[in-house]
Image (cartoon, helix red, strand yellow):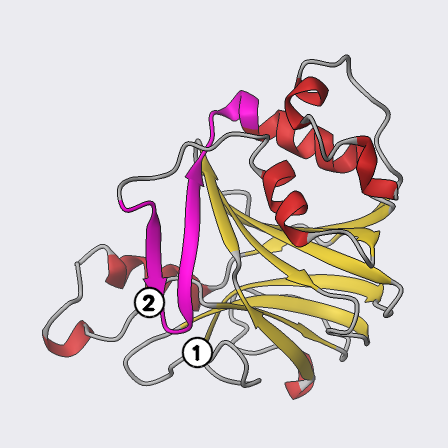
Amino acid sequence: MFYQRHILDIEKYLRAEEAPTADRQVIRDEGSYQWEGRIIGRTWPADMPLAELQQMRVGGSKRRLASPDIIMDEAGLRPIYILTDYEAREAQRLLDSYALSGIESKNLVTNSGRNILLNLLTFPTVGANTGYTGIVAFAVGTVTGTVSASDTALFGSGEVFRKQIGLTTISGNTVDLTTDFNAGEGNYTYADCGLFSSSPTSVASTNTTGTGVLSAHALYQYTKTSTVILANDYYVTLG
């Protein structure tokens, strides 16, 4: 199978010389570089084990944030890994080297996303601020538009599919929130995508479209089919 090239020894690819990357379409719609959102989608064979893909994302590293190594969200457990800048670069090189194809888009984190972060900094466990969460879900939509920091939903209420964030990595000033669409999931022609959090008045569901607070928004022009897995990596960087 395709993935048998690297399933047995991930580490040897981290020690290899620089490999040519898969072609990746890049969409430029650039805004603020002080608070940046960037989405990379990579396609993989439909029968590739997702556990292997997750291992590639962390470059074979098993070091996690802290005991008990997980954070809780409304739908279960989400692992968080800490990577050095070198490990993060090598993980991306590994993914690019073996992905079938890819798409990349760079855009803004929204004003509402900034507000979520500011409220989280107040440790909102009691009182009026209770109910803020970090990123809960990744969603895609089918309506075109121009991304703005003032956006509060995907374009034209066109959200068609969302899924819980599956794994998170942190390196330097960047967090990578990952969501993998299986062969049978999210098979639409996308125009945009976004990350959703919760506030006291707008709770994000991991499977109900149109819920929660849009914290990051980007163009995402891609047609997903049942012949591939689409691995979505959404990077949020503080400049």
Q: Quadrant of residue 53?
A: top right
Q: Quadrant of residue 130?
A: bottom left
User: What residue is shown at x 54% (from left), y 85% (from top)?
Assistant: 208
Residue 149 coordinates in the image, percent (x, y): 53, 64
User: What residue is shown at x 62% (from left), y 49% (from top)?
Assistant: 51
Residue 28 coordinates in the image, percent (x, y): 76, 50
In front of the other: 46 or 34: 46
Magenta highlight range: 68-87
72 falls in the magenta region: yes
User: What residue is shown at x 67% (from left), y 28% (from top)?
Assistant: 10
Assign a secondary structure to mark 2: loop
What residue did someone put label 1 on?
A: 204
Circle 2/circle 1 CB separation < 8 Å: yes
Residue 239 numbered tag: none
Q: Amino acid at mark 1?
A: Ala
In front of the other: 174 or 20: 20
User: Is 218 drawn above or below residue 104 in the view shown?
Assistant: below
What residue did someone put label 2 on?
A: 133
In the image: residue 46, left or right of residue 105? right
Q: Quadrant of residue 93?
A: top right
